[in-house]
């Protein structure tokens, strides 16, 4: 089984959106028994909380329900538990590097590396600028690229 962890700052906007989008894609492709998906935040601000209401509304508008997800904080053990640890931005990547065991560095990437057609290299935090629609579009593109990578390397 291949495992994927999406990571943002508080685990209430970008990473749960990515988890929901990728889970929907994986389910649609009939691969849910082969790919495990989770999300986390680099900080514990929102542990146990559901995704931001605006993130939920945008996902719902596109036919995906992320309301049951709950925030959790990323831990060093995630690098042993997941094949892909995907940071939404450079700050999250740096925070993850601080807890990453040496043998886990090859599992850590920037999520938008899987969307070369997206000009930006970081998924912007919609919590402050309210651009949930644009962020969702980026996440959808990267999710497609990630699935292609998983298929090429693992399935």
Image (cartoon, rainbow, N blue to C red):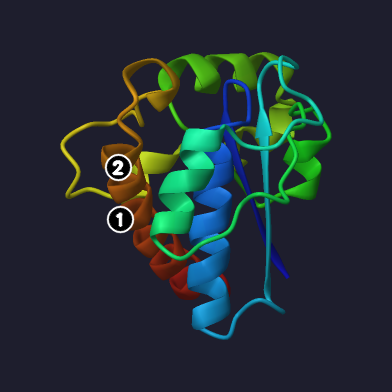
Tell whether 131 sits left or right of 47: left
Tell which of 3 and 129 is nearer to you: 129
- Give the image location of residue 132, x and y in percent: 35, 36
In the rendered image, residue 141, in percent from the top left (x then y), is placed at 30, 55
Judged from this view, the residue extending furthest toward the bottom is: 30
- Which residue: 58% across, 64% down? 23
Q: Is residue 90 above or below residue 65?
A: above
Q: Position of residue 149 (x, y in %)?
A: 43, 64
Residue 144 seen in this snapshot? yes
Q: Which residue is mark 1?
A: 141
- Disc 2 crowd, CA 10 A, few/some/many (<14, 14-19, 20+): some
The residue pinned by badge 2 equals 133
Q: Which quarter of the figure is the C terminus placed in?
A: bottom right
Q: What residue do we see at 40% from left, 56% from top?
A: 61
Q: Where is residue 78 shown, x and y percent of the image?
A: 77, 38
Q: Is the residue 107 above or below the residue 27 in the image? A: above
SS type, badge 1: helix
26 lies left or right of 47: left
SS at badge 2: helix
Taking the image as shown, residue 128 lies to the left or right of residue 107, namely: left
Q: State which tag comes first along the sequence, 1 or 2.
A: 2
């Amino acid at each position: 089984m291949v495992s994927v962890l999406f990571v943002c700052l508080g685990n209430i906007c970008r990473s749960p959106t990515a988890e929901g989008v990728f889970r929907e894609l994986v389910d649609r492709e009939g691969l849910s028994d082969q790919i495990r998906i989770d999300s986390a935040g680099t900080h514990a601000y929102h542990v146990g909380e559901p995704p931001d209401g605006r993130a939920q509304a945008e996902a719902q508008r596109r036919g995906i329900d992320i309301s049951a997800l709950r925030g959790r904080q990323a831990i060093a053990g995630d690098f042993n538990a997941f094949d892909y640890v995907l940071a939404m931005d450079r700050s999250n990547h740096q925070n993850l590097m601080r807890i990453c065991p040496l043998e886990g560095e090859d599992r850590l990437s920037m999520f938008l590396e899987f969307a070369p057609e997206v000009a930006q290299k970081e998924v912007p935090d919609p919590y402050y600028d309210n651009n949930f629609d644009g962020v969702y579009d980026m996440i959808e593109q990267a999710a497609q690229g990630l699935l292609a990578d998983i298929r090429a390397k693992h399935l």
